[in-house]
Image (tube, grey):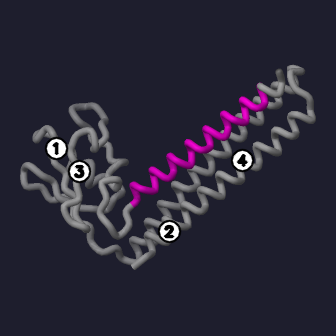
Amino acid sequence: MSDDLVTGLLEEARERMHKSVESTRHEFGSVRTGRASPALLDRIIVDYYGATTQLKQLATITTPEARMLSIQPYDKSSIKAIERAILESDVGLTPSNDGAVIRLILPELTEERRKQLVKVVRGIAEEGRVAIRNVRRDVMHDLRELKEAGETGSDDEHRAEVELQKVTDLRIAELDELLKLKEAEILEV
């Protein structure tokens, strides 16, 4: 009985930590490198008639050229709100609008901007690490509650904590590897 509970908690921890890593990987995709990618605009939220809406739900985003993004709103009246959201975001791009389509030209990254983007990426990675550590903290708390309730022994609890720490270390190492790759991609000239 207690083994099933402990195994279930560890499995849940693995799954939640994996989701944290995947979420961080997705966030990394929204940080600009030297190439245009629709994922750069994933974090942009537009105030659309009083409702906060993701840009990708309001428009088609394409990359007609290697250094250009094209945004075609489904509703032409939302073009000003989309422009404003892009200007207020941290992507560092200035939109140009012809009344039907918004174009974003990605300039060459300066050394200073690359360093700023590395800081942004490190911040995202730290948020991912914190999320993983929070999962570990929650599961440790659940394990202690099981032990206090007498549903598992202290040996089982200790073994589970050791296993949980291994999973935590593995996921944080995975995040660090993703961070290293993303930093290299940003700093690549």
Q: Which residue is mark 1?
A: 73
| Amino acid carrying mark 4 in the image | Val
Mark 3 Cα within 10 Å, few/some/many (few <14, many 20+)? many
Mark 2 residue element: helix
Is label 3 in a helix, a strand or a loop?
Answer: strand
**Which quadrant, please, contains the C terminus?**
bottom left
How far, Cα to Cα, is label 2 from label 4?
Answer: 24 Å
Left or right of residue 53, residue 127 in this image: right
Going from N to C along the chain, the mark reached first, 4 or 3, is: 3
Residue 149 location, x and y as percent? 86, 20
Q: Position of residue 36 (x, y in %)?
A: 29, 63
Location of the N terminus by quadrant is top right
Tell me: residue 51, above or below residue 113. above
Q: Is residue 17 magenta?
A: yes
Q: Is residue 137 above or below residue 6?
A: below
Residue visible at 41% across and 56% down? Answer: 29
Side (left or right) of 141 relative to 189: right
Question: Which residue matches tag 4?
Answer: 167
Q: Which mark is residue 61?
A: 3
